[in-house]
Image (spheres, rainbow, N blue to C red):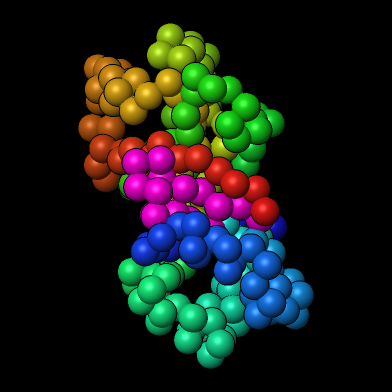
Amino acid sequence: MPLFFSEHKLVDFDNWFATFENNEVRLELEKKTGVTAIRIIRYLDEPNHLIVVFEALNRDSMSKIEFDPRLQERFSDKSIFVEPPKIIGGYHIADFENYIPGSEASMKAFWIIHDLADYDKWNDHRMETESKRKSFLLEHSVRNIRQLQNIEDPNNVISVVIAPSRDTLVALLSEPWSQETFANRGIYKGIPKIMGPFSAIDL
C-alpha cells in the first residue's frame, strides 16, 4: 500500500501531539476511509517541523481526510499550526533492510531526494554498479534502507538512508564517482538534496 506524507509546521509539538494521538475526528475518518496514520517523522534540528506518514489506497482517500471541514477548522488554529498541513506526495515503497528507527544510537536517518531525468536509466545504472555502490556506501558507513518512488512522477525518488551524520552524506555525494554520475544528464537533472536528520515515532 502506498505511503502518503503530510508536512506539518507546528507552534509547539507537545501541544499538537496531545490532541493528535487520540483525536476522535481523525480516528473516525481513518476508520471510514481505510487510511491509517502509522508514523511521525520529526526533524531533529527543527522539532516543530514534522511529517505524518499515512498508509492509504490512493490520493482520493487522503483527500477525504485532508478536506474534512472539521479537520480544516482544526488546521486553521494558529495556536497549533504555523500553516495548514499539506500532502507532499504519495510513494510506493521498497525496503532493503528491516531497520527499526532509533535502534542504533550512532546512526541517524536521512532522505536523499533524487531529481531524475529517467528512472529506468537510473535504476539500470544502479544495477550495473551494484557491487561498487555497496562497497562505496560501506566505506562511508552509510546504509540504504528504503526507496520511495512517487506514485504520480516515477522520476521523483527518495532514498532513505542511515548515516553517522549529515557531513558523512555530504562527503559521500561529493566524491568524484558520485559527481560523475550526477553530471550524467541522461540520468539526473541535478545533484540530489539531503533532508534530515529525522527521528521517528511509531503510532
Residue 42 or residue 148, whichever sits in front: 42
Relative to 200, is 85 above or below? below
Circle count: 0
Relative to 52, is 101 above or below? above
The image shows residue 5 at horizontal and vertical percentages of 51, 59
Residue 41 or residue 172, whichever sits in front: 41
Relative horizontal placement of residue 98, taking residue 17 as reference (left or right): right
User: Which quadrant is the N terminus positioned in?
Assistant: bottom right
Residue most extreme to the bottom: 69
Relative horizontal placement of residue 111, taking residue 172 as reference (left or right): right
Relative horizontal placement of residue 7, taking residue 101 as reference (left or right): left
Tell me what residue is drawn at x 42 percent, y 70 percent: 80
Tell me what residue is drawn at x 59 percent, y 78 percent: 65
**Residue 49 position by quadrant:** bottom left
| Residue 59: in magenta span | no
Relative horizontal placement of residue 51, taking residue 195 as reference (left or right): right
The image shows residue 153 at horizontal and vertical percentages of 45, 59
**Residue 23 position by quadrant:** bottom right
Residue 43 or residue 77, whichever sits in front: 77
Residue 146 appearing in the image? yes
Tell me what residue is drawn at x 41 percent, y 60 percent: 12
Residue 116 appearing in the image? no
The image shows residue 121 at horizontal and vertical percentages of 43, 39
Dominant secondary structure, magenta = strand
Tell me what residue is drawn at x 49 percent, y 19 percent: 106
Which range of residues does the magenta coloring cover? 38-52
| Residue 46: in magenta span | yes
The image shows residue 66 at horizontal and vertical percentages of 53, 78
